[in-house]
Each structure stands twice: as C-alpha cells, then as structure tokens.
C-alpha cells in the first residue's frame, strides 16, 4: 500500500474502491456528457490501471457514445445514485475514478482539463493546468 492511500466510494458507502498506488493522471473534463453526469461545469477524474484498484459493491451502469466512437460506461451506486467510476469492472484495462468519491478530497490535484472548448465561462481552473480543446492524442 502507498504511504498515501487513495480510496473512496459512493454517498451511502455500498460501492467502494481502493487503489494500491497513486493515480496515473488527474484532471477535469468539461465535455457536455460529464457536465450532465455530474450536474456541474465539469467532472474531476483520476486514471488508474485496473490492476491497481479493488472495487467492491453493486453498480448500476449507464452507457453512452464516447467521443472517439465506441461506448463509455459510467458506474454509480444503485442505492444512492452516487457516481463513482468509469469503465467495465473486470473487463477494462484502466478505470476513471471520479474524484468526488475520494474519502480525502485533498489528494486530488488536477494537472489537465479536457474539452476546454466546452468549459463554461464560470468554471475557473487552477493555475498551471494543461488545457486540451478535446481529448489529448
């Protein structure tokens, strides 16, 4: 286990996750789908390799068309509705963990902003964040 433990879950605690290392990247996404899913101007996210995560509890999945084609899967708790992670548990090589699910929110330090072209004017980003108009290559 890392000295700093990244772990979290949904509002009611039924769906939980824990990582055995720090995330590979952290950022915010301002695409229309993420704004609607979060009910905000962006969704804060962290990227982890699937083997770094232990995910426990029930999920409700919602699938939508991804920016580059294919399908995006969002996982929330079927009890409280809290949005927790993206990807197919047990099938995906990596997962997007939504930073709002962190037990310790001070661990989140975004380094990038995706879909800056869609960012509402009222969303103020931290200094030094790398901006991408859509998805990075």
Image: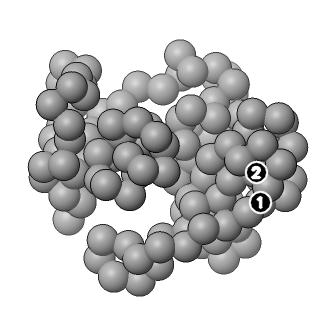
Query: Is there a contact, CB below 8 Å, between mark 2 and mark 1?
Result: yes
| Secondary structure of residue under mark 2 | loop
Please state which of residues 29 and 122 is positioned toward the viewer in this rendering. Answer: 122
Residue 26 is left or right of residue 114, and the answer is right
Query: Residue shown at 41%/25% (left/top)?
Result: 109
Q: Which mark is residue 77?
A: 2
Is 112 above or below relative to 3? below
* Distance (Cα) linking label 2 and label 1: 5 Å
Task: Give the position of the C terminus as an image quadrant.
Answer: bottom left
Q: Would residue 24 be visible to someone looking at this image?
A: no
Residue 10 falls in image quadrant:
top right
Query: Residue shown at 63%/30% (left/top)?
Result: 102
First in sequence, mark 2 or 1: give its number: 1
The residue wearing badge 1 is: 59
Query: Residue shown at 67%/67% (left/top)?
Result: 61
Where is residue 135 shown, x and y percent of the image? Answer: 23, 60
Within-10-Å neighbours for mark 1: few <14, some 14–19, many 20+: many
Is 36 above or below relative to 94? above
Please state which of residues 53 and 66 is positioned toward the viewer in this rendering. Answer: 66
């Amino acid at each position: 286990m890392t000295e700093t433990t990244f772990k979290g879950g949904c509002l009611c605690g039924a769906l939980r996750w824990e990582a055995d290392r720090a995330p590979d990247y952290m950022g915010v996404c301002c695409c229309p789908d993420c704004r609607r899913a979060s009910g905000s101007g962006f969704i804060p996210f962290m990227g982890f390799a699937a083997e770094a995560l232990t995910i426990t509890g029930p999920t409700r999945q919602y699938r939508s068309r991804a920016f580059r084609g294919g399908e995006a899967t969002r996982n929330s708790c079927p009890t409280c509705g809290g949005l927790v992670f993206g990807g197919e548990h047990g099938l995906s090589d990596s997962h997007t963990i939504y930073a709002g699910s962190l037990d310790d929110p001070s661990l989140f330090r975004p380094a990038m902003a995706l879909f800056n072209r869609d960012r509402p004017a009222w969303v103020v980003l931290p200094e030094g964040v790398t901006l991408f108009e859509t998805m990075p290559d």
